[in-house]
Image: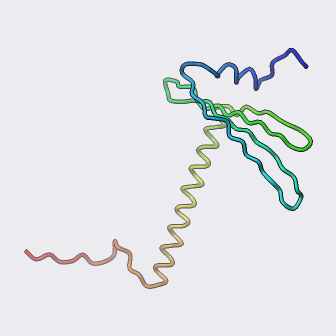
Amino acid sequence: MSDTIDHFDRLLGALHGLPDVVSTRQATVRSLTPLVGTSETFIVQTYRQQTDKGGRDTIFVEYIGRDRSLRLVLPSGVADVIARQRDQLGSLNRRKTAKRIAQERKDRGEVPAFRKPKPVREG
């Protein structure tokens, strides 16, 4: 066993227990490939350090496969990109679904609410 502390341990130790840092519980995900019969295990934990400009997330990922294991630290810049891309995909998916539904309604002959004539009020 080596006496040197690797990047993963150093950063985890630096964040753990600080008063301005909160963390999630570790989440373990097992990914199975049915046809091949292999499994991979991922352990993920996120730490958020509060700063003047908001929070900085650091994500710790441990990968265990059949032939190897790997520990990664995803710095705040990478965590921000992942969150931003996930949000973009959600927006794109909602837009695509809304267009499909609008087209289906149009094909059925439904008039959109914003094109329906407003009722005339007497009085």
Quadrant location, the N terminus: top right
- Judge whether 20 appears above or below 73 on screen: above
Q: In the depicted view, which residue is nearer to us: 80 or 17?
A: 17
**Count of numbered circles on the image:** 0
Percent from the top left, x then y, of residue 121? 14, 75
Depth order, front residue of 26/54 = 26
Q: For the point 64% across and 22% down, which residue is it?
A: 15
* Horizontal relation, residue 86 to residue 98: left or right: right
For image coordinates 80% across by 54% down, the residue present is 32
User: The C terminus lies in which quarter of the figure?
Assistant: bottom left
Task: List x then y, in percent, for residue 6.
Answer: 80, 22
Q: Position of residue 102 (x, y in %)?
A: 48, 73
Query: Residue at position x 92%, y 42% from top?
Result: 67
Image-quadrant location for residue 117: bottom left
Which residue is pictured at 61% across the width and 20% down the height?
17
**Residue 80: % across, % down:** 61, 38
- 20 up-or-down from 89: above or below: above
Classify residue 56 by image quadrant: top right
Q: Is residue 38 left or right of residue 26?
A: right
Q: Quadrant of residue 78?
A: top right
Q: Residue furthest left?
A: 123
Is 109 on the left-hand or right-hand side of 48?
left
- Compared with residue 47, is residue 122 higher up or lower down, i.e. above or below? below
The colour style of the image is rainbow
